[in-house]
Image (cartoon, rainbow, N blue to C red):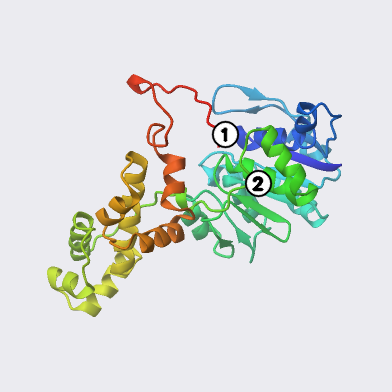
Amino acid sequence: MWDVTVVLLDDGPTSTAIVPVEVFSLAGVLWNELNGRKPDPVFCVRTVSLDGGPVRSPHGFAITPEGSIDDVERTDIIVVPTSGLEFEAKLVENNRLLPWLRRHYEAGALVAGVCLGAAYLAEAGLLDGRLGTTHWALGEALGARYPQVRWRPDLFVTEDSRAICCGGLYAAIDVSLYLVEKLCGHQVAVQCAKALLLPMPRLSQSGYAMLPVSKAHDDTRVREAEAFLQTNLHVDVSTQSLADRVGLGARTFARRFKAATGHLPAAYLQALRIQAAKAMLERDAAPIQTISTAVGYEDVGFFRALFKRSTGMTPSEYRALFAPLSVRGQPALEGGERTAVAVVA
């Protein structure tokens, strides 16, 4: 059996620790029990805190671990949860964790950081020169603090030399099933996912991200161009015409626009259109062709390809995840209440 140690930390969403405990504990167990067979556990799971004492949840309850990190002589897998968004303060508060992680990593353990748990791996030096991910909204902050890490916040799960990271809170599901599949094979992972009514690990966070198209800046002429694009995103407009509109030469305008927004004008317009398309797909049941035309693409095939390249999923797949139940073909009760509906695929 694989030995798994899940660290518990104060103030973080408990799902980032509890989900791995449950997935690993039930792999090889629940599927067998549901099918009248003898359980065949493949992981031995324990929980620890820094000092062995209870940890506090931000939601009003405490969790008591089985022991402290000092009780762990060896382990195959370590899962580090997130400990809240104030990660700089938490890195100081939980600094005892860092040498412990390095010691077990050097002894051969796989070390997985969930969401901002990746910051502990980076702070311990386990991600230096390696691939890592975190929640899509935190990639820029971690990238600035740890420039030596090759951050890919568009991905749900990354693995590089036994250092594993995953995106947001419930990417704890993805990384847990990823490790079940890696260590126990596809069949065990699929059975575990089916027994728990979970999807297999997701690949891309891009479809979930709602990042601002432009970073904050104080270039008034670029702001004027942005305002025009935001209200005319369905119109094809050249860099030259935008430059003329704000009274700059084309090359000067393109340089200032990129410096202020992080995008060239054409890429900025494309990002605006994709954000607008996401909002329409989330809101109503308009045909994909209608949405494509509304955001400026007459060629629906080109729009579909562009949308998938930007989000990791097709427009229809995006709608299936994020649209209201009635749009997705499942009835909703009046007054906004939803009814449970059995859907047969």
The CA distance from mark 2 to mark 1 is 16 Å
**Proximity of marks 2 and 1: CB atoms separated by less than 8 Å:** no
Q: Quadrant of the C terminus?
A: top right
Q: Which mark is residue 190?
A: none
Q: Which residue is mark 2?
A: 175
SS under mark 2: helix
Q: Is residue 314 visible?
A: yes
Residue sitting at 50 percent across and 54 percent down? Answer: 139
Which residue is nearer to you in this view: 232 or 132? 232
Looking at the image, residue 74 sits to the left or right of residue 86; the answer is right
Q: Residue 93, percent across and down?
A: 61, 41
Residue 299: percent from left, percent from top: 32, 63
- Asked whether, in this view, residue 339 is left or right of residue 70, the answer is left
Among the two numbered marks 2 and 1 on one chain, the one whose residue lies closer to the N terminus: 1
Residue at the (18%, 69%) spot, across then down: 242
Q: Which residue lies under the disc numbered 1?
A: 13
Where does the image place residue 27, in percent across and percent down from the top left? 76, 37
Q: Quadrant of the image for the N terminus?
A: top right
Relative height, residue 103 to residue 253 (above, below) = above
Image vertical order of residue 21 relative to residue 225, above or below: above
**Which secondary structure, mark 1?**
loop
Q: Which three-letter amino acid code belongs to the residue tagged 2?
A: Val
Q: Amino acid at mark 1?
A: Pro
* Quadrant housing residue 198: top right
The quarter of the picture where residue 300 lies is bottom left
Q: Residues within 10 Å of mark 1 (few under 14, many from 20)?
A: some
Q: Position of residue 201 (x, y in %)?
A: 62, 47
